[in-house]
Amino acid sequence: METAPARAELETWVKQMAAFMEAKNVHWCDGSQEEYDNLCNLLVQKGTFIKLNPEKRPNSFACFSDPSDVARVEDKTFICSLRKEDAGPTNNWMDPNDMKKILHGLTQGSMKGRTMYVIPFCMGPLGSPLSRYGVQITDSEYVVVNTRIMTRMGQEVMPYLQKKSYVKCIHTVGAPLNAGQKDSLWPCNPDVKYISHFPEERLIISYGSGYGGNALMGKKCFALRIASVMGREEGWLAEHMLIMGVESPAKQKTYLAAAFPSACGKTNFSMLIPPKEFDGWKVSTVGDDIAWIHKSEDGNLYAINPEAGYFGVAPGTNYKTNPNAMETIKANTIFTNVAVTADGDVWWEGMTKEVPDGLTDWHGKPYDKNSGKPAAHPNSRFTAPALQNPSIDKDWDNPKGVHIEGFIFGGRRSTGVPLVYQSFNWNFGVYLATTMGSEMTAAAFGEIGKVRRDPFAMLPFMGYHIGDYVNHWLQFGRDLPNPPRIFGVNWFRKDENGNFQWPGFGENIRVLKWIVDRIHGNASSVESPIGWMPRYQDIDWTGLSFSKDEFAKIMTVDREPGKQELLSHEELFERMYDKLPKEFFFMRELLLSALWRSPEHWGLQPEIG
């Protein structure tokens, strides 16, 4: 028996919950391969999992969710802080007592006929001072096997669980089974779902959904919403950011953290493969989704990826857009809501040009190519271990974390925002990240093409008031002797015919090289109205024919659209007016006056003799 300081406390809690939810059995997860294999086989027997062709996808499975349970439910996600003003204007709030009354009624007896699984888990490298711990109870085998890929979980976590210092995660699919009742292939409550967070209690209760971020509590619920509150109280940052290492041919390694809203190529960027002309440059992945960033005693920032796997969006992933992701998911992977091929492999839109014959679509039905409907759900996913990524960074599991020297922020903007620029200083960088916008795609609910403000790409994931969050960032940088540089990028600018002006993907290494050179003081720039920008000769164009004119077009800052952009920040500021940092008013005025006094199309001026 392991020495777990919190074991007695945990056992009492589990007994109470099992009795209240009327669980048939209780299983304490040990995190072993044997347990994982047994649960996957159980899911195959139940009909939830389809075992894929072992020659094509060894030890991999596909499953189809209920059509009511395919994505995060933002309108049913609540921050139940004691005071409404602590949740702020961008979160749904409900009084914790009122929410608990609702959940009490829903969860009582909700595990009838099912096994309650107890999952002790660690977010971050086991034993690291930067890691935090949780215990999830769930009645879903799907959740257990996905959590084993996504976190460090099981027996080895128990010794680290201190009394009252772990996050309690209660999850039920909300589908009790009566004696003799046949279980559904994807148990959930199709009509009622609640994802509720109680920040002061370090408690998460999720009811009615078996899918992804609603059910895998370690993901967005703990690693962002609850962790952002912990970070604010303890003086660190929990961010929706990838972490990448960029190594030059001279073997100088620079770690960067980058935030992009959904559908802006975050996973692709974190696994970037430089073109052959950039031989000697290497990009490695520490994490593709979440970063926990702490200050060290030497005044530098160190980040860990709290996750141990990838829960990636499948559609659009192929050997051209992301070869490393394709290699990562060759084996030991769980696929959710993708199509299954006639020979027991998986397929999704964008994987190959030709649609294979004999597909089974994500509803489990034969796929009709002429239906005009996609075979895989647009939010279909793969869950794969991080260790299988060919570009995994050698320090991805280092308990000390990796030294972050720069931050990158970017959205999907077809006009107005240049390819790359560096903020004047930390404060202007925080302003840039707060006002970051992205044009709507199918991934976010809303009017396609309309700019949605998504501060720090954290809008759905902040566990507290957005104004307090921005102030925390400002203060965080003020206390650093040499804060990381902050950059804005935009891979998505289009010309008058609607074509992308920048090739993107592997070519983004050219922008990364300038960013890294700026961080180390090895690259020139010119001052623009919005920040420092590279000149044509500051970018390495080896092997890419990209003319000065093309570069000028992708770097212009247009006065009128620029002014409109700044004025549109008012809507966001007005929402968080009571807690908006005073500096923001003045920074906006400075940017506005710089644009006001600039030519109609501010461009990179030719050098004088």
Image (spheres, rainbow, N blue to C red):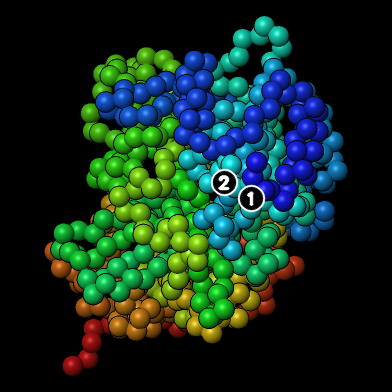
Residue 165: % across, % down: 72, 54
Please tell me in which quadrant of the rendered image residue 467 appears.
bottom right
Is 593 left or right of 91, judged from the image as shown? Answer: left
**Tag of residue 278:** none
**Residue 294 location (% of width, % of height):** 56, 68
**In this view of the protein, which residue sits in the foreground, 158 or 585?**
158
Q: Using the numbered discs, state the Cα–Cα distance from disc 1 to disc 2 in whole angstroms.
A: 7 Å
Query: In the rendered view, does 344 fall on the left or right side of 260?
Result: left
* Amino acid bearing label 2: Glu
Examine the image and state in which quarter residue 154 appears: top right
Is residue 415 visible from the viewing direction of this image?
no
Q: Which residue is at 56% across, 21% downward? A: 186
- Give the residue number, with chain letter if any, for mark 1: 159
Camera-nearest residue between 331 and 312: 331
Residue located 48% across and 52% down the image: 289
Which quadrant of the figure contains the C terminus?
A: bottom left
Residue 336 vs residue 305, the one in the foreground: 305
Q: Quadrant of the N terminus?
A: top right
Q: Mark 2 and mark 1 in contact (Cβ < 8 Å)?
A: yes
What's under tag 1, amino acid-wise?
Answer: Pro
